[in-house]
Image (cartoon, rainbow, N blue to C red):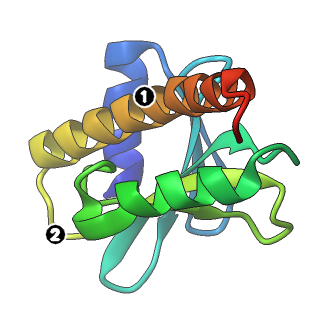
Amino acid sequence: MIKDFLIKIENGLNFTYKEIQKNVFSLQVSDRIEIKIEVIEKDFILHSNVSILGNEKKEELFSYLMMANFLGYGTGRGKIGLDNETKMITLSKRINKNVKYEEFYEILEEFINYVAYWQKEIIKFIEKQKENIFS
């Protein structure tokens, strides 16, 4: 089922997808956004790296990102987190596997928009923190 969805998306939007391992797919949206889609028992998990985690203003950034995670309002009900090596800020979202294509497409589109938003927002946040002489 997910392969059918990804083929439709690939043909309609000129994104490219590939199966990188069993039940794990990579959807290349742009040079800055890659979405990994993992198929598990009852769900799909969307996952994307958002930004490299630098060493500057980490505590302030973590506080800011935790506020975004609160109730999922800043993330479209996804979760901002860190990768296993704690080098990348990530965004993930779980979707029920029983969705129809149209609903999957809308959820994916929204997820991509949140990834792009947070890529820009983290850069703005760090630049603003650097300008603040009192921090």
Q: Label 1, secondary structure: give it.
A: helix
Say whether residue 84 is visible. Answer: yes
Image height of 49 relative to 31, above or below? below
* Viewer-nearest residue: 28 or 74: 74
The residue drawn where x is 58% and y is 34% is 122
Q: Position of residue 4 (x, y in %)?
A: 33, 45
Q: Around disc 2, counting alpha carbons within 10 Å, would you say few (fewer than 14), some (14 to 19), or many (20 or more)? A: few
Q: Position of residue 67 (x, y in %)?
A: 38, 59
Q: Are marks 1 and 2 in contact (CB under 8 Å)?
A: no
Does label 1 or label 2 sit earlier along the sequence? 2
Q: Around disc 1, counting alpha carbons within 10 Å, would you say few (fewer than 14), some (14 to 19), or many (20 or more)? A: some
Q: Position of residue 103 (x, y in %)?
A: 12, 47
For mark 2, what is the residue?
98
* Residue type beneath disc 1: Tyr
91 to the left or right of 98? right
116 to the left or right of 18? left
For mark 1, what is the residue?
117
The residue drawn where x is 53% and y is 60% is 63
The residue drawn where x is 71% and y is 41% is 135
The residue drawn where x is 11% and y is 40% is 102
Residue 9: quadrant of the picture: top left
